[in-house]
Image (cartoon, helix red, strand yellow):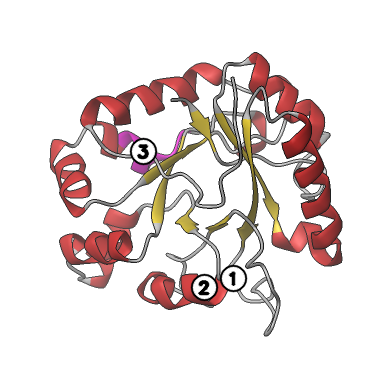
Amino acid sequence: MTQDLHSHTYFSACGADDPELLILKAIESGIDVFGISDHNYGIGDKKRSYFSLLTELQQKYSGKIRLFRGIEIATVNGLCLAPGEDISYFDYCLVEHIDRPDSCVGGENIISFSKRCGCPTGIAHTDLFSYLERKGSDPEAYFAGLAENGIFWEMNVNYDSVHGYREHSYVQAFLNSREQQKLVKNAGVCLSVGFDSHRLGEYRKERVKQMCDFLENLGIPLFMPEKDIVFKK
């Protein structure tokens, strides 16, 4: 199975693409499971219309791809979820910035924040091993806690102009560390794969597929949103 659960459209200030064109690109690229996860602060008060559009597209392309309706949540001061702001109806959310000193959540509070979100929660593009080392936390216990609470960790394989053609160092470290791989596998935590697309013309399907194949060969499960849809390929 090839999945990509991290992509951005014109609903994100940093994105540029029409959601339907992005879905068609995913189908053309042989992606089996695809998620659109625009930034919460970019969507703003258009969350319901954003969700409705993704639902329409989910139904329209249900025979060709499994599409999930996601949202990416910033946790730095000024961009945090407002009290009472509801995102529980999304298929999943990706949470970013939890390793930053100015995070309004912090990695130590991700479990309680996941419950506040009310939908399946993943940690986006975060070097958890370095974060835990700085905090003096036990990685085995931390990843076990993620697994027990259904929280997944993203392998972000982005490589595009928006991010300066830089690969995430934590992903490279994981690819080269049998110790990290073994710990994650033994903890039972699910991983997700995301290209973090911002420009349709720069989509690199081979990076997504290579990571999905790598995790499958390791026997590490890929996260799948619980709110599934009927799918016939």
Q: Quick one: label 1, few (<14), some, or many (20+) residues within 10 Å?
A: some
**Helix, strand or loop status at disc 2:** loop
- Residue ID at (55%, 70%): 118
Q: Element under label 1?
A: loop
| Quarter residue 132 falls in | bottom left
Q: Position of residue 131 (x, y in %)?
A: 32, 62
Q: Which residue is mark 1?
A: 76
Q: Is disc 1 in contact with disc 2, using a CB cutoff of under 8 Å?
A: yes
* Residues in magenta, as a range: 167-172
Q: Amino acid at mark 3?
A: Val
| The disc label shown at residue 103, or none | 2
Viewer-proximal residue among 231 and 167: 231
* Mark 3 surroundings: few (<14), some (14-19) or many (≥20) residues within 10 A: some
For the N terminus, the image quarter is top left
Element marked by disc 3: helix
The numbered mark, 1 or 2, whose residue comes first in the sequence reads: 1
Q: Which amino acid lies under the numbered mark 1 shown in the image of this protein? A: Val
For mark 3, what is the residue? 171
Q: Nearer the viewer, residue 156 or 192?
A: 192
Instruction: Give the residue at x 50% y 31%.
Output: 3
Which quadrant of the structure image shows residue 81?
Answer: bottom right
Residue type, numbered disc 2: Ser
From the viewer's perspective, is residue 98 above or below residue 82? above
